[in-house]
Image (cartoon, rainbow, N blue to C red):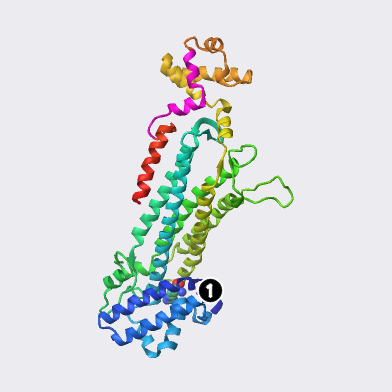
Amino acid sequence: MEAINASIGFDRKLYAQDIRGSLAHAEMLAKTGIISTDDQKKIAHGLNTILSEIEAGTFTFSTRLEDIHMNVEARLAELIGPAAGRLHTARSRNDQVALDFRLWVKEELQRVDNALGGLLEAFVARAEEHAASVMPGFTHLQSAQPVTFGHHLMAYVEMFGRDRSRVRDAIERLDESPIGAAALAGTGFPIDRHMTAKALGFREPTRNSIDTVSDRDFALEFLSVSAICAIHLSRLAEEIVIWSTPQFGFVRLSDSFSTGSSIMPQKKNPDAAELIRAKTGRINGDLIALLTVMKGLPLAYSKDMQEDKEAVFDAAETLDLMLAAMTGMIGDLEVNRDAMKKAAGAGFSTATDLADWLVREAGLPFREAHHATGRAVALAEEKKCGLEKLPLEELQAINPSITEGVYSVLSVANSVRSRTSYGGTAPSEVRRQIRAWKKRLKRD
Ligand code: ARG
């Protein structure tokens, strides 16, 4: 029973939140006259002693005492005697654990918010540097149209920006204090839940005591926000793995974020990127684990809910690490502009520009222009040359309205420069988005 029941092995992580919650609860009990100020002072002194003992590593945790709440309370009794028994007036471990865990998740969400801020800044800085560096844009991982590396990086800025706003939404929603819901029904003691909510930095107290001790959405939301963010990180990680192969050669990882092979001296392996890609699996697993624990649980508290913590702790530790590694890796990634530019011109990537030119300058319907371009690509393929190397007469044989002017759109730099639509890849447009993001990051 002790082995299956005890959670102290992992919920000791909540010690600071548990003590903070108890300090606020005891103060409220004294202010409302439910306990004496004398007892409250003893309790506060005892709790602060316990905090230092835990932080100094001298506190003995016991599995016999099940969880962090009972470990702290038992030690409090040793330290201050019978006054310790008054602390648990008008509360239950059910609202206590809901409080501790909410406080912890809120702090973690704030850490993720900060880390995302750092990541976004690193991305925007690299994007600015490469606002005009041409690279191939892909669909189906086949060269599609030339884009700029800055534009590609800014795509991730949008994703991580949405992750950050999801983090903030989650904080908004969880910002309610559970303490005082007691076991599930509230209490007859004249407590002041607004007072404890305020003391603990919550916007307000929760409104329904049954919901309060049953709810773990805040943990599920943390996990889902983390899973989405991890998936974004994993896509970029995968791209870094591909880009850093000698075959692509778009980027070179610094020695700090890669490893050599123990047998093949030429190798530089993208381990950090691979681990970011892989660790996404843990976070997805953590989300599914808690969703499955919560599914079909009748109201209100059931011990099943003790299984909420390890998933959240694991996801938090993993995500923090992934964000730190990605921020470092992006910051010192060496970019090979020439290799990117060369690849950008391969695969007839300006074919769409030719088709657009035929529509714009020769008045062809797009479908017809698409067909004529297809013939030009086939010809270039046959001659093993780029579209821009096809002689004018041969292009005119495909469509007589083609003139010398067409060559101006067949280069990758011109192709990119022409995509000036809002959100498009033109360096001028990318720089505009970068300026807007810089302002936004400063504000946030
Ligand atoms: N360790 C428990 C948990 O994490 C605390 C709440 C226990 N409540 C109870 N009625 N047994 O959920």
Q: Residues within 10 Å of mark 1 (few under 14, many from 20)?
A: some
Point out residue 232 in the picture as x, y percentages from the top left corner: 49, 48
Q: Which residue is located at x 70 percent, y 50 percent?
A: 261
Q: Which residues are magenta?
A: 404-422
| Of the pair 91 and 295, the residue shown nearer to us | 91
Q: Main secondary structure of the magenta part?
A: helix
Residue 411, above or below 331: above
| Residue 420 in the image, given as x and y percentages of width and height | 40, 29
Viewer can see residue 299: no
Q: Is residue 442 above or below residue 21?
A: above
Q: Nearer the viewer, residue 278 or 180?
A: 278
Which element carries disc 1, helix, strand or loop? helix
Specify the amino acid type for callout 1: Gly
Q: Residue furthest right?
A: 263
Measured as percent of width and height from the top left, residue 349 is found at 53, 27
What residue do we see at 45% from left, 63% from top? 294
Closer to us: 210 or 91:
91
Q: Which residue is mark 1?
A: 9
